[in-house]
């Protein structure tokens, strides 16, 4: 070996040990991978997120760490540039039915009212900023977690608080998983047995032309009066126009699903590989998780309370359960509300009404994001 000028001591000097923060992040990544593999919980998102988080927190030498960084930076750039959130909204647009909110406009009002929780948390975080050290931009990006929409959290954090991108986006996706657990408890807390048993009529049929006209008008109004929300609203409405015009059906369902799945994997890697221990394990992350949860609870509660008020004004024709679907994580909250209503009363079918409120939550959540961007851009 000496003839080759190779010093075996270099093998030992090349060893490096993770910091405490790295160990914590490695353990978190292991939990994400375990949940994805063994519990089948959002595997297309959590598995790449866990692997990405593991890769960037291993104590790799510079030469190999740079390879990992160059590999993941391509996907991270897609998230930080806003491309992924826009593509996600486009995909959601191909799945939603705008006719549900056109059939009964009061459902749109219920969904929009849920966003009050977002602004309440923003004002609270902003007023406590001198104590927490959280600036207004991060407060806005944290408050949008109340919409329970990972794409929305990704979009706003990338533009307003890129240093907290991983914490805000992970919190947004994390609380989506809590929906089936938290929503029933809030419904029981805020409604009566009589209110939960209210039956709602079927919605009227809305023509394809009405939906397309609505999409075009919505894009035009947004582009003129709220241009900062146009990338999200425009992508959502564009996807819906393709759906209603049957153009999206040209693509086989298998190809559509493959595109969505690949996008989900890319998002997972981008989020996970942004979660460095030195930027993630901070006091700011604690505040983001805490206030984000508060925003989520308040947003859901406001939807339920608004539905209760409308139920009184309409003399008992609205089931407040649908108010819990006024957040953006389509279609999880609408299905959760529907299944809960059926447990209360087996003949109670609230799916279409809940999906209408859910669709309204997506649109109004994007509008909230646009309003925050107006404030800070």
Image (cartoon, rainbow, N blue to C red):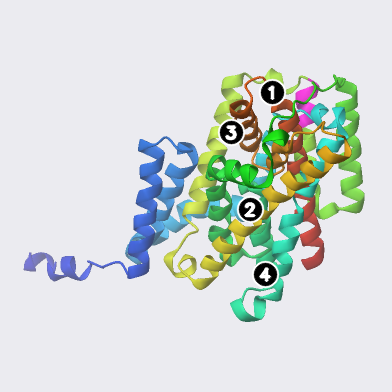
Which residues fall within the magenta stretch?
Answer: 240-245
Residue at the spot of label 4: 125
From the image, give the main secondary structure of the stretch colored magenta. helix
Is residue 84 in view from this perspective? no
Circle 4: is it few (<14), some (14-19), or many (20+) Cα within 10 Å?
many
The Cα atoms of the two marked residues, 1 and 4, are separated by: 39 Å
Q: Reading the chain from its start, which is encountered first: label 1 or label 3? A: 3
Do the residues bearing badges 1 and 3 touch, measured as CB atoms within 8 Å? Answer: no
Q: Reading the chain from its start, which is encountered first: label 1 or label 4? A: 4
Residue drawn at (60%, 34%) of the image? 336
The Cα atoms of the two marked residues, 2 and 1, are separated by: 25 Å
SS at badge 2: helix
Residue drawn at (48%, 71%) of the image? 282
Where does the image place residue 145, in percent across and percent down from the top left?
A: 64, 54
The Cα atoms of the two marked residues, 3 and 2, are separated by: 29 Å
Quadrant of the image containing the C terminus? bottom right
The Cα atoms of the two marked residues, 4 and 2, are separated by: 15 Å
State yes or no: residue 207 in magenta.
no
Question: Which quadrant of the figure has residue 219?
Answer: top right
Do the residues bearing badges 1 and 4 touch, measured as CB atoms within 8 Å? Answer: no
Q: Reading the chain from its start, which is encountered first: label 2 or label 1? A: 2
Q: Reading the chain from its start, which is encountered first: label 4 or label 2? A: 4
SS at badge 1: loop
Residue at the spot of label 3: 260
353 is higher (above) or lower (below) than 61: above
Q: Reading the chain from its start, which is encountered first: label 4 or label 3? A: 4
Asked whether, in this view, residue 142 is left or right of residue 22, the answer is right
């Amino acid at each position: 070996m000496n003839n080759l000028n190779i010093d075996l001591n270099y093998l030992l000097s090349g060893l490096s040990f993770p910091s405490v923060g790295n160990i914590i992040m490695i353990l978190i990544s292991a939990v994400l991978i375990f949940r994805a593999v063994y519990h089948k919980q959002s595997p297309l998102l959590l598995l790449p997120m866990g692997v990405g988080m593991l890769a960037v927190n291993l104590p790799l030498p510079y030469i190999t760490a740079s390879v990992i960084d160059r590999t993941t930076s391509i996907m991270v750039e897609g998230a930080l540039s806003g491309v992924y959130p826009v593509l996600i909204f486009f995909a959601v647009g191909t799945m939603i039915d705008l006719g549900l909110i056109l059939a009964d406009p009061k459902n749109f009002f219920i969904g929009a009212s849920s966003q009050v929780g977002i602004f309440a948390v923003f004002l609270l975080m902003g007023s406590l900023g001198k104590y927490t050290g959280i600036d207004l931009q991060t407060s806005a990006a944290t408050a949008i977690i109340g919409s329970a929409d990972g794409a929305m959290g990704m979009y706003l954090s990338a533009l307003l608080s890129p240093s907290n991108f991983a914490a805000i986006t992970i919190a947004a996706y994390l609380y989506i998983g809590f929906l089936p657990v938290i929503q029933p408890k809030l419904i029981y807390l805020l409604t009566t047995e009589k209110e939960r048993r209210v039956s709602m009529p079927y919605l009227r049929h809305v023509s394809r032309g009405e939906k397309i006209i609505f999409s075009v008008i919505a894009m035009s109004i947004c582009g003129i009066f709220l241009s900062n929300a146009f990338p999200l609203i425009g992508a959502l409405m564009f996807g819906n126009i393709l759906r209603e015009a049957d153009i999206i059906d040209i693509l086989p369902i298998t190809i559509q699903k493959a595109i969505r799945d690949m996008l989900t994997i890319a998002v997972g890697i981008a989020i996970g590989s942004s979660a460095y221990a030195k930027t993630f394990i901070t006091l700011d992350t604690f505040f983001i998780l805490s206030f984000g949860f508060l925003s989520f609870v308040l947003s859901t509660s406001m939807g339920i309370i608004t539905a209760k008020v409308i139920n009184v004004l309409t003399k008992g024709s609205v089931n407040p359960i649908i108010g819990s679907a006024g957040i953006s994580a389509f279609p999880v909250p609408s299905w959760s509300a529907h299944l809960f209503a059926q447990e209360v009363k087996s003949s109670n079918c609230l799916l279409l009404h809940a999906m209408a409120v859910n669709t309204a939550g997506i649109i109004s959540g994007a509008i909230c994001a646009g309003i925050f961007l107006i404030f800070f851009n």
